[in-house]
Each structure stands twice: as structure tokens, then as C-alpha cells.
Image (tube, helix red, strand yellow):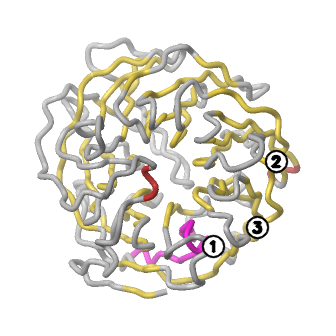
């Protein structure tokens, strides 16, 4: 792996080619838009920090709405034909799933993935462009969200980001250039200059891949390690984050079978297993995880229940109780439901459920776990499901929310 710790240095591959991830046929935009103060009505927030896993539980209320109304933020592609104008703002009822639009936060270009700070006082968005950046958005207790600045990631096409559980570091993954970056978060929750950039240079790309493609970066449940999932090299990289300097040091590599195309992982609540969605070979993989070493050990690939061919599995989630897992299948337009068995060691395929939209790019639970949101890229909608706590069954609420090129839903 190669490293660049200079804050303003751009990865040499930043200008290469269109972003295959979009499946929209368009090239990446080449410039980051100017930051604008939003005019949309926003949500007021008070917070209850979540556990050390980084899964923060934000306690929020919305002005001029009932107490059950909670904020929902939707990411989109602003440079795509028919795309959005920024981050779509909405509220939802955590019991019924009813969703109501409240406006748009402008000044954030191509915000295709969103993450909230553990305090609930800010959220962060990737700017998925050739000159990649990450943008900070303050969530005031009273008043609308406001953009407070952007920083370059040093790579191209950033597609995922997460906040370290301590709340002091933002981690991001540059898909097109195959690199991961670290930015400091200051006391005002704004972003500082990049402190590290690591490019995945080994192993070589898998079949049909032109290079590394970092697709996700997350912190392990114990907070000791950072894992980066790379679709291009069929590898999950484990790092240690120096929480004083904001630098990453390599610890281990978990290699998946050639051509698997690992895209996203999620941890079982026990912290001893992780589940990986593999985009290219249409499988899900259960991995053993050793918290003491940070090593991930992939098991045998498992069916997504979508039949032959590939359905471009996108994201996998596991319930807070660790009893059920769900996988979004973009080509099949479905959600796969698994029973989690053996204290997290096994996934048993139960069924697939129509998603009620086209090309479910990302899925997310509401903080209560009662609802599951699916962002459907091609239909420009967000589907809302009620989750049965006992059976894990999903029931579409019928309240599909229209949002242009919806690629990420963040319910708080």
C-alpha cells in the first residue's frame, strides 16, 4: 500500500474515467460545487450518544411536527440527469413509516453517502466527484441544517464515509482511486485538513477490474481497528488508527475469492463475526473476526436467493439483537432476509421480498429498529418497511417517498 500524508496532494488517478458505480452511464463531474447556505426548513436535534460501536442513537425532534416525527436525510447525485439539488430533507413517523418532505439542503455536490456524528450535532457527506471531497453539515438544535465546509479527500469518487466512535476522526473511501482518507473533526464538528491517505496497491486487481476500488471504511465494534472493503482487489484491509495523529497503520488483509467484488460489511453485535455483501459474484459471506488482532477470516460464499447471474448485492444489515440480517439486491429489486444462527456464525436464507422500487442502492434501520429504509436509485424513491421484531418479516408500509436518484437514506 502506498501512502500520502500531505493534505493537499491529489491522488494521481483522480481524473481517470467514468464512475462505474453509478450505473447511469455518466462521467464523474470534475469540480466541487460552491458551499451554499440552505434555505430549506430543517430539524432540531438533541442527542443520546450510542454505544462504542459507533452506531449512535440520535434523539431528535422536528419543529412544527408531532413528537413522533423524526428527521430523514436522503443522498443523491446532483450531477446525474434528473438528479437532486443536494441533500433531500424529510421527516418520518417511527410507527407508521409515513414520510414527509421538508426541503433540500443545497451546496453539497453529489452527496451519495451520509453519516451522522455520535453527538448528533452534525452529519457528513461524500462529494462523489473526480476531485473528491467530504462536506460537514451542522444540525442545530433550533433551525435548519447548515453547510459548514468541505475538505478534499485526495482521491476520486469517494463513495462511503463513517465517523470513528470517539467522534474526532472522519474516515472516507475513494472508490475510483482505491484509497482511504482520514480527516480530523474539531470541537465545532467542522473538518480539518486531511491527516492521512492510503492507496491500496496490493494485491493486484481481481478479474475484470482496472485497479483498487475502496467501497467502504468502518470501525470495528471494539473500536480498536478500522476495516476498508475494496471491491477491485477482492480484499478487506484492516488498519489501526492512531487517534492522536490521525494516521492509519496496516494490520492485516482478508482476501476473498477472485472476482467476488466485496462491497459492504456489517458486524454482528457480538463483535466476533462480520457479514460481507459481494457485488460481483452475487454472494454473502460470513467472516470470523478476531478483535485482538483485527484479522477477518472469510467463510464459504452463500446464496442471496436471487437466482442465477448477478443482482449486484449492495448493502447488508443485521438487527441490533443479532437475530436477522438483510441484504439489498439491486438487479433483483429485492431484500433478502436471513436468520442469524450459531451466535452469529451462520446465515440461513429465509426469503426475498420485493423492495417496491428499482435498484435499491442502500438500506438503513431507524434508530428504534422498527423501520427499514431502502434508497432506490433508478426509481428515485425511498421504500419504508416495518420490521417484525419476532420473525424479522418485512412489511412494506405503502408510503414510498419520491426523491430524485435516491442513493442513501439516513434516518435519525
Q: Nearer the viewer, residue 146 or 403?
A: 403
Name the image quarter holding the C terminus.
top left
Closest to the camera, between mark 1 and mark 3, is 1
Query: Where does label 1 land, which residue?
Result: 207
Residue at the right extreme? 342
- Disc 1: CA contacts within 10 A as few (<14), some (14-19) or many (>=20): few
**Of the pair 75 and 28, the residue shown nearer to us:** 28
Rendered residue at 54%/39% (across/down): 363
**Alpha carbon of mark 3 to alpha carbon of mark 2: how far?**
13 Å
Q: Is residue 328 visible?
A: no
Looking at the rendered image, the disc whose residue lies closer to the viewer, 2 or 1, is 1
Magenta residues span: 224-244
Label located before the other in sequence (2 or 1): 1
Residue to which mark 3 is pinned: 298
Image coordinates of residue 403 in percent, x first then y, are 36, 28
Q: Nearer the viewer, residue 272 or 217?
A: 217
Q: Is residue 407 above or below residue 211?
A: above
Q: Which residue is mark 2?
A: 347
Asked whether 236 falls inside the magenta stretch, the response is yes
In space, the residues marked 1 and 3 are separated at their CA atoms by 19 Å
Amino acid at each position: 500500500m502506498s501512502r500520502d500524508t500531505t493534505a493537499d496532494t491529489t491522488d494521481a488517478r483522480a481524473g481517470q474515467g467514468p464512475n462505474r458505480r453509478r450505473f447511469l452511464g455518466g462521467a464523474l463531474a470534475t469540480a466541487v460545487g460552491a458551499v451554499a447556505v440552505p434555505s430549506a426548513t430543517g430539524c432540531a436535534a438533541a442527542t443520546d450518544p450510542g454505544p462504542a460501536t459507533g452506531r449512535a442513537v440520535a434523539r431528535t425532534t422536528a419543529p412544527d411536527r408531532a413528537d413522533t416525527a423524526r428527521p430523514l436525510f436522503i443522498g443523491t447525485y446532483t450531477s446525474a440527469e434528473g438528479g437532486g439539488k443536494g441533500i433531500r430533507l424529510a421527516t418520518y413517523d417511527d410507527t407508521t413509516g409515513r414520510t414527509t418532505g421538508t426541503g433540500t439542503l443545497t451546496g453539497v455536490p453529489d452527496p451519495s453517502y451520509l453519516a451522522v456524528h455520535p453527538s448528533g450535532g452534525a452529519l457528513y457527506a461524500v462529494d462523489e466527484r473526480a476531485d473528491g471531497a467530504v462536506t460537514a453539515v451542522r444540525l442545530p438544535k433550533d433551525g435548519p441544517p447548515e453547510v459548514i465546509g468541505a475538505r478534499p479527500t485526495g482521491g476520486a469518487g469517494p463513495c462511503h464515509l463513517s465517523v470513528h466512535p470517539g467522534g474526532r476522526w472522519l474516515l472516507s473511501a475513494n472508490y475510483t482511486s482505491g484509497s482511504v482518507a482520514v480527516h480530523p473533526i474539531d470541537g465545532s464538528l467542522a473538518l480539518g485538513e486531511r491527516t492521512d491517505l492510503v492507496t491500496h496497491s496490493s494485491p493486484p486487481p481481481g478479474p475484470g477490474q482496472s485497479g483498487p476500488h475502496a467501497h467502504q471504511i468502518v470501525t470495528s465494534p471494539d473500536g480498536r481497528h478500522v476495516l476498508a472493503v475494496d471491491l477491485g482487489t477482492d480484499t478487506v484491509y484492516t488498519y489501526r488508527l492512531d487517534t492522536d495523529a490521525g494516521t492509519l497503520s496496516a494490520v492485516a488483509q482478508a482476501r476473498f475469492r477472485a472476482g467476488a467484488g466485496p462491497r459492504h460489511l456489517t458486524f454482528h453485535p457480538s463483535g466476533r463475526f462480520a457479514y460481507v455483501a459481494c457485488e460481483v459474484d452475487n454472494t454473502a459471506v460470513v467472516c470470523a473476526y478476531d478483535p485482538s488482532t483485527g484479522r477477518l477470516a472469510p467463510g464459504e460464499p452463500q446464496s442471496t436467493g436471487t437466482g442465477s447471474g448477478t443482482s449486484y448485492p449492495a448493502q447488508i444489515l443485521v438487527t441490533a439483537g443479532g437475530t436477522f440480517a438483510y441484504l439489498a439486491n439491486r438487479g433483483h429489486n429485492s431484500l433478502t432476509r436471513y436468520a442469524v444462527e450459531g451466535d452469529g456464525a451462520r446465515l440461513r436464507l429465509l426469503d426475498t421480498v420485493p423492495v417496491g422500487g428499482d435498484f435499491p442502492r442502500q438500506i438503513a434501520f431507524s434508530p428504534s429498529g422498527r423501520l427499514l429504509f431502502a434508497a432506490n436509485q433508478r426509481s428515485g424513491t425511498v421504500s419504508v418497511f416495518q420490521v417484525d421484531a419476532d420473525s424479522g418479516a418485512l412489511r412494506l408500509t405503502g408510503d414510498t417517498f419520491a426523491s430524485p436518484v435516491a442513493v442513501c437514506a439516513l434516518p435519525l
